[in-house]
Amino acid sequence: MIRTALATISALLALALPAAAADDFIAAPTLRASVTVTSDVVRVGDLIDNAGSAALIPVYRSPDLGTTGALPVAQVLSVLRAKQVIGVMTGDIKEVQVTRLARTLASKDLENAVASALERRFGLGDAANIAVTFDRGVTEMRLDASNSGAMQPVATRYDARSGRFDLAFEIANDNNPTPTKLRFSGTAIEMVEVAVLTRDIDRADTLKSSDVALERRPKAEVTGEPASRERSVGMQLRRAMRAGTPLRAADIVKPDFVVRDQAVTVIFQAPGLYLTTRGKAIESGAEGDTVSVLNLQSKRTLTGVVTGRGQVTIQGASQSAPMVPAVEQTSSLKRDEAPAPVDTAALLRNLVQVPASPAQIAEAQIPQARVSQAQAKSE
């Protein structure tokens, strides 16, 4: 009976002791398969969980900013044993991946920062139109992840003649009261979008859509107002120009609808009268220009406005041969007062030599019916 009681007590004690020991048990250190660090060293606490007082002990140099390195488990355990860290649980981990976090500044970010610092200063325009080139080929820049602040320009130097710049920036650092300093040098040129010729163009050529392309060129290369592509198409040049030449607004003009010595149609319009005849242009002109033409029938020089291709319209008397003025419509006419009749014969004499017969009228290309109607009205 006593032996049975002692055996029972021993069994109970054996069951109780592991439970009591479990309360005082310190969790075993466990290796991590993937590690991210922000500093330039890897510490014991970065590699394993439950590192205890050894957590701050440095064991490796961190990978380069923004890169990842691999450590074989056997090598890691060897280094930890040298630091008196033993009993590390590895499980089935074969290697440890260590990644160093970083803040990456792409080349475009740096160019934008420089352009923003120069925007609307030193005679430059908007930042979007400033092309930045660094002295050293800067593709991208990696900073410690603690550099979380914005790039603030603190010193700016720029030579407007050469386009050279020298800029210093500061970035706030979360781990250090002293900001990180960056310095860049290079060239910054203001660019403009301009229409450029894709082939050699003569003075008489009309610009087609395929003749003009849009390019960004240094503003210094385009003196005056640059011409847009939409405005250039359908126009002519004031002079012959070679391919690759940027166009200015002053270089383009309306196309000539009438060319010097060209045979043109002369139209004479007056109240109750519409005449056409043939003539020869004495000078060239675009639509809306005033040009002189020679009437081939009367050999008179007339002045009219170009209203179409090969077409000149005369409203009223020409300067070289004054005509009887048309009825002047003013507010002085009374309600029942009729305007003075048009002297059609005088108008015809100033435009053409009036034929004496219907046959001559046909030869002069004057519609007989219209002339008769006009004369009937004047009578």
Image (cartoon, rainbow, N blue to C red):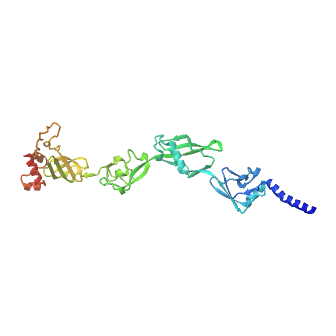
Question: Looking at the image, which is closer to me, 102 or 245?
Answer: 102
| Residue, far front | 1
Total tally of numbered discs in the picture: 0
Q: Is residue 327 left or right of residue 16?
A: left
Q: Is residue 169 left or right of residue 50?
A: left
Name the residue rendered at 37%, 52% in the picture: 229
Name the residue rendered at 18%, 47% in the picture: 314
Residue 240 in the image: x percent, y percent?
Answer: 33, 52
| Residue, far right | 2
Residue 238 in the image: x percent, y percent?
Answer: 31, 49
- State which quarter of the image contains the N terminus: bottom right
Question: Looking at the image, which is closer to me, 192 or 93?
Answer: 93
Name the residue rendered at 29%, 50% in the picture: 254
Residue 183 in the image: x percent, y percent?
Answer: 58, 44
Q: Is residue 350 left or right of residue 197?
A: left
| Residue, far top | 332
Residue 177 in the image: x percent, y percent?
Answer: 65, 41
Question: Looking at the image, which is closer to me, 260 or 190?
Answer: 190
Q: Is residue 146 above or below residue 95?
A: above
Name the residue rendered at 11%, 56% in the picture: 363
Question: Looking at the image, which is closer to me, 263 or 88?
Answer: 88
Q: Is residue 123 above or below residue 358?
A: above
